[in-house]
Image: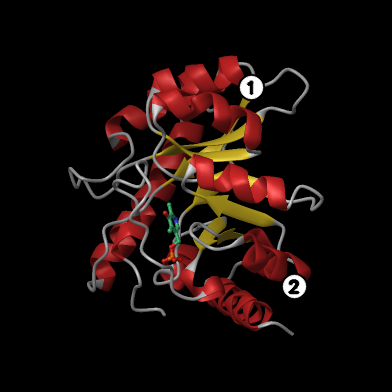
Amino acid sequence: MSATGIRLQSVHSRIRAAALAAGRDPQSVRLLAVSKTQAAAAIREAFDAGQRDFGENYVQEAIGKQAELAELPIHWHFIGPIQSNKTRLIASHFDWVHSIDRLSVAERLSAQRPAGKPPLQACIQVNVSGEASKSGCDPAEAAALVRAAARLPGLAVRGLMTIPEPTDDPDRQRAQLESLRTLAQDIVAQGGPALDTLSMGMSDDLEAAIGAGSTMVRIGTAIFGPRAVRTDAPDRASSPGQTLPDSQA
Ligand SMILES: *Cc1c(COP(=O)(O)O)cnc(C)c1O
């Protein structure tokens, strides 16, 4: 088996152990392999090891790899910050988008989703840490944004996504992750729409995120190894990718 396949297996073991420790069904957590900055060949290795969902942060980079891998039935997820001038490409090249943080972006994605395709599966990104540098809407605005986006054709709002503040304090980490779950539960309890997805958990906080209710973990480094630092991408600002390689390497 490839090195990527072996690391993928160990991530599946971590997901399984974390789910069981939390009294959850391991099948209730979906694994999204974050392949930003990784070559198409690495994605192919993960695909050959059974992985089907891949997440990308940079539109142009993703489209190049999608063309190289066009024969593979991959579910492509866009997880990076969204610039308005990129929404048309995102709407036409991806199955999921996790990083809607304002209504204008939701409206553009809705209007630009090609008619023949199924609705774009969507999460609203929430800034649970309150850090000024982080993408995501304010938690107080999340319910209104979810409801407005859920009314748009061409979008299927599935849930919430967050990137918590990196911290060594487990209580602080847990509080941030649980605040996303609570927010989703409150939205559903206050009239919906129904939400079935909590997109949270990365290589370093996968266990804590599953303990707090994550249904989709976004894992890069632990599957593909360390990323090369990109210096050429204009749309990389405020992505966690820019500080890597990180401690999981
Ligand atoms: C890069 C990235 C990840 C994966 O991070 P790792 O620490 O490599 O697992 C997850 N989510 C988002 C939004 C990212 O940009």
Reading the image, the residue beneath label 1 is 113
Residue 142 x %, y %: 37, 31
Residue 159 x %, y %: 52, 39
Going by the numbered disc 2, the residue's amino acid type is Ala
The residue drawn where x is 40% and y is 78% is 248
Q: In the orientation shown, which residue stands out farthest toward the front?
A: 232
Q: Quadrant of the C terminus?
A: bottom left
Label 2 neighbour load within 10 Å: few <14, some 14-19, many 20+: some
Observer-nearest of 151 and 35? 35
Tag 2 secondary structure: loop
| Labelled disc at residue 240 | none
Reading the image, the residue beneath label 2 is 49
The residue drawn where x is 54% and y is 72% is 224
State how far apart marks 1 and 2 are (Cα): 31 Å
- The quarter holding residue 53 reads bottom right
Quadrant hosting ligand 1: bottom left
